[in-house]
Amino acid sequence: MSEVNTTQYLKGNWESAYNMFTDTKKINLDDPTQVYYAMLVAYDYDRFGPERDKQLHELPMTGRKEMDGLTISLTHNLPNINRGHTLFPVEAQENFDAITPDEDVDIAIYAHTHTPLWRYTSSEQMVLNPGSVGQSWFTRQKFLADRDASYLLLTLADGKVMDVHFRRVLFSWETEIQIAKDRHFPYVSVYQHLLETGNASTHNAEVLGKINDAHNYRQTVIDFLKELEEK
């Protein structure tokens, strides 16, 4: 990730889940969803190495940029909560009023919901969400069927917002799935369903349970927990 010249990393809901699991080393092995999460953590942990693991544990929840006379806040979701449905596009105005840490912020940029968004707080602070690459999300089925990637170009000059440009570009989920298969990513069928349709199987105990049993993932997680305990 360092090769793309990223200037700000934040702690999202997945990073928090990863940190919690590797720190507490606790899981309900009878819950297919928890086994699913643990398997994904194990997959990442085996590939990250000590440096990336340390980075994930030290990530901040918020970022702040001063650009062209404007103050921009950066969060994954709310400044103190990086999970949940609080900032889904149709949620209450009061939820979006809580996205900025203070009144000095002019523009608040967040992620999490995977849905492109442009609205304002009650103080008319601009709130933007660029959407997502590969996992765009809408509740309206006609929009959800569009699996193109989404991103945002924000142009600033002389203390003004010159342009807010939401862009959609083709995303080949077929190529992504082939990469996942080549890298022996667990739950490839679940991942393909997500990329192809936009619908997650995270809490589908029946589907996850069958996959866990077929691949003996429960035992893999037990072995991974022992590995963590021994370190």
Image: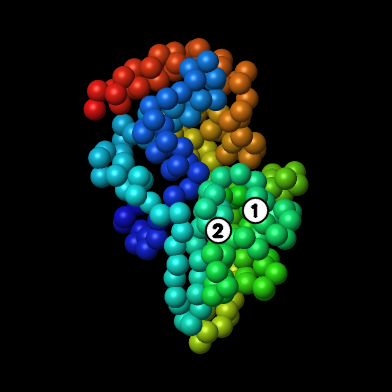
Q: Position of residue 122 (x, y in %)?
A: 70, 69
Q: 156 or 91: nearer the eye?
A: 91
In the image, is 143 to the left or to the right of 225?
A: right
Write down the quadrant of residue 92 in the picture: bottom right
Marks 1 and 2, Cα distance to the nearest angstrom? 9 Å
Residue occupied by mark 1: 87
> Three-letter amino acid code at disc 2?
Tyr
Residue lying furthest bottom: 158
124 displayed left or right of 81: right
- Vertical arrangement, residue 87 with respect to residue 199, above or below: below
Q: Which residue occupies 50% across, 12% down? A: 213
- The residue pinned by badge 2 equals 110
Q: Position of residue 16 (x, y in %)?
A: 45, 42
Instruction: Look at the numbered disc 1 and give the secondary structure of its residue.
Output: loop
Q: Is residue 27 above or below residue 113?
A: above
Q: Residues within 10 Å of mark 2 (few under 14, many from 20)?
A: many
